[in-house]
Image: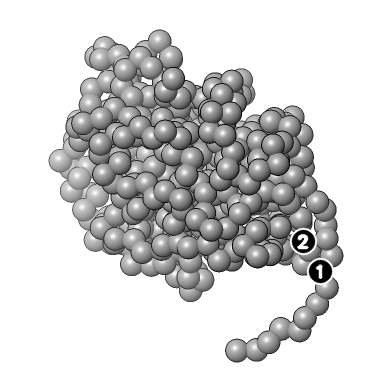
Amino acid sequence: MITEPKRETRVYCETDVLVVGGGPAGVGAAIAAARNGAKTLLIERYGHLGGLATGGLVLCIMPMSDGTKEQQIAGLCQEIIDRLDTVGGAVHPKKEDLGSTNQNLINYWRHYPFTVIQGNIRMSVQTDPEMLKCILNDMIEEAGVVLLLHAYGCRSIVDCGVVKGIVFESKSGRQTIKAKVVVDCTGDGDIFASAGAEYDDEINPELRSSKLALVFRIGNIDVKKYLEFKDFRSERYFELMKELEALGGFTMALRTWRDDVLWFNNFIGDLDGLNIEDLTRVEINARKSMLITYNFFKNNIPGFESCYLMDSASQIGVRSSRRLIGEYILTRNDINSGILFHDTIAVCPAFQQGKSLENLHMHIPYRSLIPREIENLLVAGRCFSSDQVANDILSPIQFCIAMGQAAGTAAALSVENNVVPRKIDYHLLKNRLITQNVFLPL
Ligand SMILES: Cc1cc2nc3c(=O)[nH]c(=O)nc-3n(C[C@H](O)[C@H](O)[C@H](O)COP(=O)(O)OP(=O)(O)OC[C@H]3O[C@@H](n4cnc5c(N)ncnc54)[C@H](O)[C@@H]3O)c2cc1C
C-alpha cells in the first residue's frame, strides 16, 4: 500500500441533478430530470451514449408488452423507439398486431428475438446501435442536459451521510462536480459503493446474469438462406453447433434489424465483472473464440459464404455486478406473486421464453432505487436493489430506461420541493410519470 499525497481538486461545476453513466438507465434519468425542470448534467466514461444497448452491441430491446394488446413499458422507452423509427433504426411488430396469434404473423416474427413468446406477438425491438447513439445525443441535447463524455466518475463526495457530488477523472485531469442529487446509473454501482452504501455482489453461477460476454457482429450474410438451413436441416445444424462448441466457438446467432447482419451473444462463466484481470481475460479470450466462430460459420454454414467480421463490442458485457441493498430489496417472490407496491414506478411485462408465468406483470417500487442510509443519492438500472433472481429478470434495457425515467423525475422533484429523494411525495412522482406516458396502475 502507498499513501497518495493530499491535493486540492478543482470544482468543474455545480448542478441540481448529476447522472453518472449514460446507458439506458442514465439516459432515461437525465432526460427525465431535465424535462422536469432540474439543471442536469450527465457524465459518461465512453465517447457515446447507450451503454450496453450501443457499445455492448445488445441489439434487442426485450418485451415491452405482456402478450395482450396492451403495452406496459411506454414513456421514454417508446419515445426512443419512435425516434429510431424515423431514421429506419428499429424493427418491431405494429402496435395493432400485439397479442396476435395469427399464424402468418407468427411465422414472420418468430426468428426475431423475444418477439413471439408462448404463441403471441410482443413488442420487442431490434435496434441499429449507431442510429441509437445519434438519437440519444439528440434527445439529451433537446432536453437541455449538459453532457460530458470521456469522464469517469471515480468516487462520491459524502459529508455526514449526505452525497454532495462526485470526483471524476478525464483527459482534463481530476475534477469535482457538486450536485444536489446524484443518480448512480453506472450499472456497476461505482458511485453508491464509494459512498459507503450497502450492496451485494454475490451471484449464483447458474444464473444467466452471472456470465460475462463480448458480443460481436458478422455482416454480409444471406440471413434468409441461413434460416432455411437452420429450420429445414435442423438436425445437421445442431450437429455442427456441437462441433463449434467443442472447438471453443459461440453458437448463439441472433437476428437483427437487417437481413444481412447477425449478432453473436455469448455466456462466459466463472469470472467477476468487477475484477480487472477477469475483464482483460474476457477481452482477449472472447476474441479468440470470435475468430473460431467466424471461420466456422463461413466455412460450414449456408448463407455465410461471403460474410465478414463486422465489429466487436467496445463495452464488455457485464450482466450483473453490484446490487444496491436499498430501502426495499425486490425479490424473486415479489416477481412470482406479481405484487403491486404502494410506490410502484414501473409495471413490467413478465416473460420467459417457453415458460408459463402465473402473473402477467412484475412491479418495481420506488424504494428499490433508494439507498438505506445515504441521502441525496438515487440508483437506477441493473444495479438497483434486488435479489439475484429479481435482478436477473428485471435488468433488460426497457426496464432500465423505465427505472431511469422514475429516478430522474424523482431527483427533479426532490430539488423542486427541497426534500431528500426518500421523502418526496409518491403521488406527485406518480402523477408526473403518468404525464410522461408511463403506464402505472390507477
Ligand atoms: C451480453 C448481454 C446480452 C444482453 N441481452 C439483452 C437483450 O437481448 N435485451 C435486453 O433488453 N437486455 C439485454 N441485456 C441486459 C441489458 O443490456 C443491461 O442490463 C442494460 O443495458 C443495463 O442498463 P444500465 O443503464 O443499467 O447499464 P449499462 O448498459 O451497463 O450502462 C452503464 C453506463 O454507465 C457508464 N459507466 C459505468 N461506470 C461509469 C463511471 N464510473 N463513470 C462514468 N460512466 C460510467 C458505462 O460506460 C455505460 O454507458 C444483455 C446484457 C448483456 C451483457
Q: How is the image coloured?
A: one colour
Q: Position of residue 187 (x, y in %)?
A: 52, 53
Quarter in which the C terminus is drawn: top left
Image position, residue 291 (x, y; %) = 42, 58
- Above or below, 208 against 101 in this view is below
Q: Looking at the rendering, which quadrant does residue 414 occupy?
A: top right
Which picture quadrant has residue 222? top left
From this viewpoint, which residue is outermost toward the left? 235
Q: Earlier in the sequence, mark 2 or mark 1?
A: 1
Which of 187 and 285 lies nearest the eye of the viewer?
187
Q: Is residue 410 visible?
A: yes
Identify which amino acid the numbered label 2 is placed on. Thr
As drawn, the residue found furthest toward the bottom would be: 1
Marks 2,1: beta carbons within 8 A: yes
Q: Residue at x 48, y 70 (%)?
A: 275
- Front residue of 127 and 240: 127
Query: Which residue is denoted by mark 1 in the rendering?
Result: 9
In the rendering, at what x and y percent does residue 61 appear? 45, 34
Quickly name the residue at label 2: 176
Q: Name the residue: 39% across, 35% down.
A: 341
| Residue kind at label 1, given as amino acid type | Thr
Residue 105 placement, left or right of 50: left
Residue depicted at x 69% and y 30%: 35
